[in-house]
Image: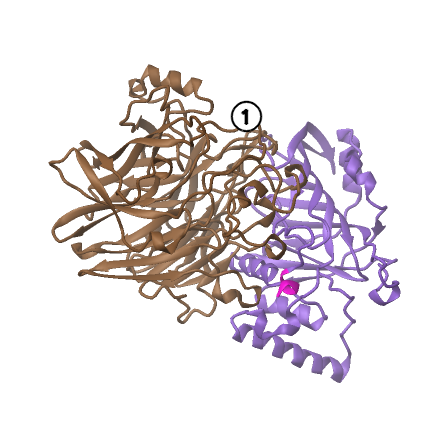
Chain colours: A brown, B purple
Amino acid sequence: MRGSVPAALSGFLIVPTNRRSKDRSRFARWHDSQTDLIRLDLTPGRPGRVRTRVLPVDPAGVDLPRPAAVAASDRRLTETANGGYATQPNHGVNVAGNTLWATNLLFGAPLEVDLAAWKPRRVLRYLELSEAAPRVSGTSHFAWSLDHRFAYFHQSLLERERDGSPVRAADLSLVELDVATGAERVWRLRPPPDDPAMETANFHSGFFFEEGGCRYVGLLRTGALLESLEPHSAPLDHAVLPAPASTIWIVQLDPQANDLQAELLPGVKELDGLALSHLDVDASGGDGFVLYANFKEADVAEETHGANVYGEVAEAVAEHYSGMVVEALNYGLVVRYERRGGRTSVRTFARPYDPGRTSLGHSWLPINIQLDSARRRLFCSFSGFRPRLLPEHIARAYPARVVEPPTAGFVPPALIRFDAETLELDSNGSGRGHVAYAEPMAMTVAGDGDSDYVCTFSPEVGLRVYDADDLDRLVFRAESPRLMSWGDTHFRPEPAHISFVPA
Amino acid sequence: MEGWPDPPFLRGEGPEFIEQINTTNDVVARLEEAGWDFEAVPEIFARQSAACDVAAKEIVTVFDGERQTRWGRLIIKGAGARFNLMSHESPLARYVGARPSVFALVNSQVGSKGLHDFKEFAEMDPPQEVEFYNPSVFYQARDVVFWNALNGFQLFPSGFEDVRRVLASGNVIRNLLFRPGAPTKSAWEIAEGEERRPIFMEGFSGVQFPTGVVEWMPKPLYGGMSEQALHIETLLTTDETDLAHPYLDLVAEGRLRIDEQTYFMRRFMGISQKDALRGPGVPPEGARR
């Protein structure tokens, strides 16, 4: 621990991490990897204190206080479906009060955790599994009502692939969770008539807004397309079905209805971006919204394995491990979509990496996107590009989108501050303090309205906290070699997200 | 890192040196003014492949709960006549020089031949012994640019951004110089079409810094010569620990004795990765422009 913890950061940082075998040839999908939830307790002071607590998650849910919450039939399906589980929340963080809902990228139901006690409470699954549909998918990053009382997320069954057709979603549902009373309700969702494909009906993030006295939920239809429900029995090259351009579904909430009809948000499909994933939203005022979201331009249903775009076998690529999060096909896109007072406007940021002009940043594999406490600045993290980790069989499916391998160089990760109004780089008065390269990907902005801080974390690098006004100004950092590995056999790769919970 | 062809040794003396200082100051000022964009100062932008990488390393880390000493035996693959090696460390770190004997001392008690336990190590040419000299510390990004520009070296923007992040996180850059007795042939000494065969060098270093926890060395950036490194890491602690290395396999465990002190020992071995790798045949970032 070096530096001092400011008073505004009294609280917790929550990081969902996972374990990977040090034997890099062992295939395991990222989704399926054992979850360790990490809680970093921040105590303000000089130097202050950072303590960590790790919660290993039982994916079968049998350690829950109410094990009946995971029915015996579910457990049987979990055991029989190769790689199946009731919950494997190694990705998203959703918090209200003393409760955390941790989620997976794509599979499994959210796990509810008592934050203070740091113990799991229950698995939130609202659909009945069957032999033909043995898994569920859900929204990783929930939508929240303006008063933060209601959480909204999608959940659907995943039906096995059959007769040459890929995995399909079924029983699309929207869940409302009253975090004050614990009451829940579930609507069935009908897809927009012009976006009906159930093969790609999955939604990584959601947002809430009000307009004309009505309440709405927007769902980012990410569009991951799975060829099979089970992980590969062997990490061989295979035919990849290309994912379609992402869209956004808008659903008007109707307390009287059982079914809700979704509509497409105009102008999003036309952006022609892949893997619309993360967002932040300013829906204040109750008349529309300003949405900030990012397209990864990656096939997020696939994993790394097999030969890369240079024809190198995986064993020849030291940084490779089978089943890691897939690399982007090309640089991605950040979008600012404003719909207020009956008017709509769209701004975008898309930029390749120019080594001669690093102050301009880039948009390769956008991950985190978050407004500061005043909603005037937008902070985004971009994972960059490791060209040797792009598998040939994935690139082959996207000839019109993929970067030319001979010209594709390494692109370092970048953390960038934008002006939230214009979506231009926010370089005012800070020299180069608006772009920071080589930071860990997991990033969050925390503050009390007067001061904002940007926190980044990876097990290898540790926790770093910067002044949001100047990403070159470190406030404090902390590291522990204990977070890097699990036992002698596993390590914890870089996580995607971190979230701050004030005390 | 060394450029291609070998940069001339630029430093003069007396008035000539003062003139070089002024010129270098101008380079630094222009780069800083341009927000560290290399396009504005092309003379600092490395266009050719860098030519120096650690290809194998044996590290002995001694940790007593308050202080860590890291002894290193480095096998460096390079093409050139003189080189520099930059690493990052705590501003409170002390460079303690070389201690080659510690590796024999450890290996004899572990029952290991050190790097020779790797079959791949035998495939490397026998290394020339080099000594690190003129250890210096860079405290600011402008120090890094200044030193490199003054000495005729150039930088890659991604590597420089990594350095900026190290400095922004409150660490410093340690720079070590070394030169082999029999350097690689210069570009003008080889026949047309002849390949410039890299050489291997062996150097020892040591650094000590205060810390309450063991700090593993971070992943280095690819320097253009060796995409990975054979890596042995021996952790010696005064208290028993089950701490593991994040990437290397545990290969031995026990106790051993050094300097009249008994330590708990955990030894890790494997291939360690580098960051910023590019595909085969893909030129470094400057040359792609």
How many marks do you count on the picture?
1
Farthest residue, direction bottom: B15
* Secondary element at image label 1: loop
Tell me, yes or no, whether the highlighted magenta stretch contains residue B287.
yes
Give the image quarter of residue A94.
Answer: top left
Q: Is residue B25 above or below residue A40?
A: below
Q: Where is residue A312 in the image (x, y as percent from the top left)?
A: 66, 42
Write down the region rendered in magenta.
B285-289
Q: Is residue A153 above or below residue B278?
A: above
Tell me, yes or no, whether the highlighted magenta stretch contains residue A111.
no
Q: Residue at x 39, y 48 (%)?
A: A245
Farthest residue, direction front: A163
Camera sees residue B245:
yes
Foreground of the two, B259 or A260: A260
The quarter of the picture where the C terminus of chain A appears is top left
Q: Which residue has dot 1 on it?
A: A233
Question: Chain under label 1?
Answer: A
Q: Which amino acid does label 1 sit on?
A: Ser
Judge from the rendering whether residue A365 lies leftward or rightward of residue B190; answer left or right: left
Give the image quarter of residue A80.
Answer: top left
Q: Where is residue B95 in the image (x, y as percent from the top left)?
A: 69, 54
Judge from the rendering whether residue A456 lies leftward or rightward of residue A259; answer left or right: right
Give the image quarter of residue A389.
Answer: top right
Q: Residue at x 60, y 56 (%)?
A: A409
Foreground of the two, A42 or B45: B45
Foreground of the two, A501 or A125: A125
Q: Residue at x 53, y 67 (%)?
A: A357
Q: Position of residue B80 (x, y in %)?
A: 80, 61
Mark 1, other Cα within 10 Å: few <14 / some 14–19 / many ≥20: few
Camera sees residue A7:
no
Q: Position of residue B250 (x, y in %)?
A: 65, 30
Judge from the rendering whether residue B103 lies leftward or rightward of residue A267; answer left or right: right
